[in-house]
Image (cartoon, coloured by chain):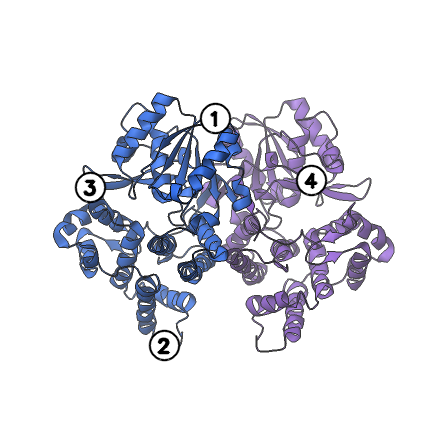
Chain colours: A blue, B purple
Amino acid sequence: MSDFRWSNPVTVYFGPEQFKELGKVVASYGKRCLMTYGGGSVKRTGLYDKVMGYLKEEDVTVFEKGGVEPNPKISHIREAVAMCKENDIDVLLAVGGGSTIDATKCIAAGACVDFDPWEFIAKHIVPEKALPIVVVLTAAATGSEMNSGGVISNEFTNDKASVRGPVLYPKASFLNPELTYTVPRSQTAAGSFDIMCHILEGWFTTKPPMDMLDEIQKVVIKTVIKYAPVALEKPDDLEARENLMWASSWAMNGFMSSGFGGGGPSNHPMEHQLSAYYDITHGVGLAILFPRWLRYCLNDETLFRYVTYGVDIWGVDPNQDPHDIAEQAIEKTEEFCFKTLGIPSTLTELGINEEHFQEMADKACGPRGAINGFIRLEPKDVVEIYKMCL
Amino acid sequence: MSDFRWSNPVTVYFGPEQFKELGKVVASYGKRCLMTYGGGSVKRTGLYDKVMGYLKEEDVTVFEKGGVEPNPKISHIREAVAMCKENDIDVLLAVGGGSTIDATKCIAAGACVDFDPWEFIAKHIVPEKALPIVVVLTAAATGSEMNSGGVISNEFTNDKASVRGPVLYPKASFLNPELTYTVPRSQTAAGSFDIMCHILEGWFTTKPPMDMLDEIQKVVIKTVIKYAPVALEKPDDLEARENLMWASSWAMNGFMSSGFGGGGPSNHPMEHQLSAYYDITHGVGLAILFPRWLRYCLNDETLFRYVTYGVDIWGVDPNQDPHDIAEQAIEKTEEFCFKTLGIPSTLTELGINEEHFQEMADKACGPRGAINGFIRLEPKDVVEIYKMCL
């Protein structure tokens, strides 16, 4: 195991009763609030009115910037940054899922500098200051509610990359599982796989972390496997929704990967190119890529991890040839993604062809020319994996 | 599941490489430091010199208050508080295990008020201010390194109770598993059971928490069952020591008990009376009490939890009568405590008799007249459990 540092300053208010504290918490950071949200769903579900009610009780003046899109766009962030500066905003309130929270992090940093917010991403600038962020989470997926990163798309250059820094942790995140009852089926499926993938990306390593964390990671993966189908079947199942929501936050807040000895994620950089070029749903891209990536990485040195995965996660009979166990584990993963979750199984179904594979692969590998994850992937490997997804 | 709030502001520096940051971190809180520690072990092992070296590099002026005893005493804390006030101390550095850290929390709060520090405990005063605390952990046990409570003994009144409040979280805790290689065998055993007991106290409930947390709790319990014997056998086994150390912190930092629907702990209040009256090792008291408490709480309503405990934790064959499974689970617990860990199995062995049982039971039940845990225990029940331990 490697040394590590753990710190997570986010205060989480979990459950419907805690949600009632929202107004007071926002007001503790200031009386001029910019509220960000996505499409119309927060208005349709009544959440918008509820949040406004809580803020009004505390005499918070609310400015609004709705319309954050999935794969949030830099142009929209620029507009919001201008609003913050013009209106002397004290605090940001993100009401939404990962896209809204990610966008809000970039807005929070952008509001405190004189340069264009895309420079944080393009020039890898770690923000030194940010407006305080409060989150009302409406979808279990990205874990952005409890970490310090945000992924932003530049629609002018087809780039998608992240801004990251300790000042971007939300001050408080309100996690009310009841708010996810109305998440569309396809988004529940994609979000669930995003959670799983956050853990599996790191879990597949030839240098496993501390045993306790290895086992805890398995628990969270199995939590998603158990409860995602329940939430698809019965969207207002509280037990399923609360497990998925808390799994989302912990899959990506740094705890489980503490002392992780492997490389970085592999599927996330490959997927970011897919959604940058084709604006697809992140979790859908991940679910299409992941089983192919598993197949591509399988070799004599990595095999032992597939065996553990098959036996401990999918209940595959351990009394078989390791290669058979690995094959069954990959098949179970495919079955889960494409049958149980009902996610499209190929890029072709999404209207994606090979046209941009080479440039996407080059971008995914970045200036170092490779993705250093479970196994090292160069652009030619990434192209190969993209092709396996057609 | 109940609503909950999660927040933990401690920054953890885990591992030998991170330990090198100690001087800088202490200095970031001020140049006048009071270092607290226990008996002579920190000097014997060379840790004292190492810490002093790190502090000197950063020009920190160090004052010292060694001699913190197990079940830390209020008289010692009063002396340390006076030292803080006389010497204009900026920051406290606790080098030790749970007792040293607990004492340091009370010193940190005491240094910021004009009244006697025992009043925090006697009058249930939540401290509003405290000196910043940095921790160098030398034993995996209490979890004090990552929470906001400290248990203090008043040797004049035989009272033992806690001071608690958000200002008492350590700012930073240095967890270097290598520092626990020299922990004596009996302390490794007692500390390990303390970790287990922190989780099991809450895990035994008729209102289980969120499924994911329930499973994570099982992982941490099994981590201790797996690695405590390894550390006893081979004290410098890094894998065992790092798992036990991280388990210690997470068993008691609030995460696993998030949304826990049951009552408070039962064995801890019963044990605090034992160590208040007889100054025994906390983990030893817990290990003697716990299996008896398990037996005492077993009834038709609680049985299902014993079955899960037996099957999932101890690997008892599930195809048996539930009562047989429960009995075997309790026997496995006794075997682990008294054979594997080698902890004395009776209070009699520690020279304790019934003399004070009634007053201890009254104190354990407190002003409410009962311990509301897994099952409700009145003083007569507590006396009965104490007697079972003879």
Parent chain of label 4 = B
Asked which secondary structure carries label 3, the reply is loop
Residue drawn at 73 percent across, 50 percent down: B269
Q: Earlier in the sequence, mark 2 or mark 3?
A: 3
Front-lying residue, B165 or B222: B165
Quick check: do tags 2 and 3 share a chain?
yes
Residue position for label 2: A320
Judge depth for marks 2 and 3 and give the one in front. Answer: 3
Q: Which mark is residue B68?
A: 4
**What amino acid is found at the position of numbered circle 2 in the picture?**
Gln
Is residue A45 found left or right of B371 in the rendered image?
left
Marks 2 and 3 in Cβ contact (< 8 Å) = no
Q: Which mark is residue A158?
A: 3
Q: Earlier in the sequence, mark 3 or mark 1?
A: 1
Parent chain of label 1 = A
Residue drawn at 79 percent across, 55 percent down: B378
Q: CA distance from mark 1 to mark 2?
A: 62 Å
**Category of crowding for the residue at label 2, using alpha-carbon neighbours closer than 10 angstroms: few (below 14), some (14–19), many (at least 20):** few
* Up/down of A8 relative to A202, above or below: above
Judge depth for marks 3 and 4 and give the one in front. Answer: 3
Exactly how many numbered labels are in the figure? 4
Residue B303 image point, x, y percent: 65, 68
Residue A103 image point, x, y percent: 33, 37
Q: Which mark is residue A348?
A: none
Quick check: do tags 3 and 4 share a chain?
no
Q: Which mark is residue A30?
A: 1
